Image (cartoon, rainbow, N blue to C red):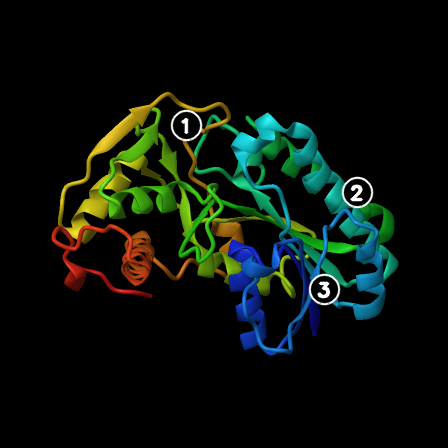
Amino acid sequence: MKVLVTGGAGFIGRCTVNQLLERGCQVVVVDQRREQDEPVWDKSVTCYKTDIRAEELERIFAEERPDYCLHLAAQVSVAQSFENPDRDAETNILGTINVLRMCVRYHVKKIIFASSAAVYGNPVSYPIVEKSELDPQSFYGMSKWVAESYIQSFSDQYNLDYTILRYANVYGIRERRTGEDGVLTAFIERMAGGLPMVIYGDGCQTRDFVYVRDVAAANVLALEAGSRQIINISSGSGISLLEIGNILQDICGHSISLQFMPQRPGDIDRSVLSNDRARELLGWSPSYSLAEGLRAMIGYEYMMRKTRGLVHIPDRLDYSRITAI
């Protein structure tokens, strides 16, 4: 089985590629990242440095003839979608259309698309199910919604099979930092530097956090399950940002100060996604608890800071309380 992964050098992409390799798949990665940001895989992984909007994408599909396409490449920042909605739409909508055209032209069996809980906005009832009304509060969420619609239309017109996965808030160890790495990474980075955790809003807003390895497992399962379905990938429970601070304090054994800032445009007040359909159609359920994931992230952050000689606070941190996954 040959799988082409767009965005394969990214946060979720790297983990997904590793799981595909463990399964014995032949993997082709398409990503526009700089050379120094590329992960190191064995020679069995064929990597192309290109943009999903580029004409070169056709040459790659023509040469590789993948059986499946995992489409993870995207502009993922809500803030940047407000600052530059044109770029957001070009990547997330026009880029997806280009990938779809190639999938049809070169007879790809199925496309798996990384969508987002951002398409839901602020629903009136919880947990959010796949049939909940869509009301994105950001251009990013809108671009994902439009991309989903194109995928369904291509399926209707050209009989292209698909699975759309709507991710909750994905977190985990990030070897490469971009400045748009999610609230948990930001919390832990500041905590490790002895700085207060910055919370936008009052901290009562809830999020549904799902560990990156669990998301990668869902991506792989969707290759052969969930035909023509939209499926939430989530923990199935919500937690407030204030509660996250308490968990971090408990793991590290020291107090953490908080700094509150005004709520940002496009931020969602509450997010809890049902994962019942993922359990039923994919046979998937989350394997990692939030505490396990946070311990792994904290351990990695402090290890990297120590390796690089950065300021950290070992006198306050009880390393015996930290374990890695």
Q: Residues within 10 Å of mark 2 (few under 14, many from 20)?
A: few
Could you tell whether 186 is left or right of 274 in the image?
left
Q: Name the residue under label 3.
A: 68
Query: Which residue has dot 2 on it?
Result: 153
Q: Which amino acid does label 1 sit on?
A: Asp
Q: Which of marks 1 and 2 is in front?
A: 1
Instruction: For marks 1 and 3, give the CA distance.
Output: 36 Å
Distance (Cα) linking label 1 and label 2: 31 Å
Q: Position of residue 21 (x, y in %)?
A: 58, 74
- Pick whichever of labels 3 and 2 is earlier in the sequence: 3
* Amino acid, disc 3: Tyr
- Residue at 13%, 46% (x, y): give it: 254
Q: Nearer the viewer, residue 181 or 22?
A: 181
The residue at the point 39 percent across, 62 percent down is: 287
- Where residue 309 sits: x, y (%)? 28, 57
**Residue under circle 1?**
269
Of residue 232 and residue 69, the one placed in the foreground of this image is 69
Residue at (70% x, 74% y) in the render: 1
Residue 135 makes an appearance in the image:
no
Q: In this view, does 242 lie above or below 211?
A: above
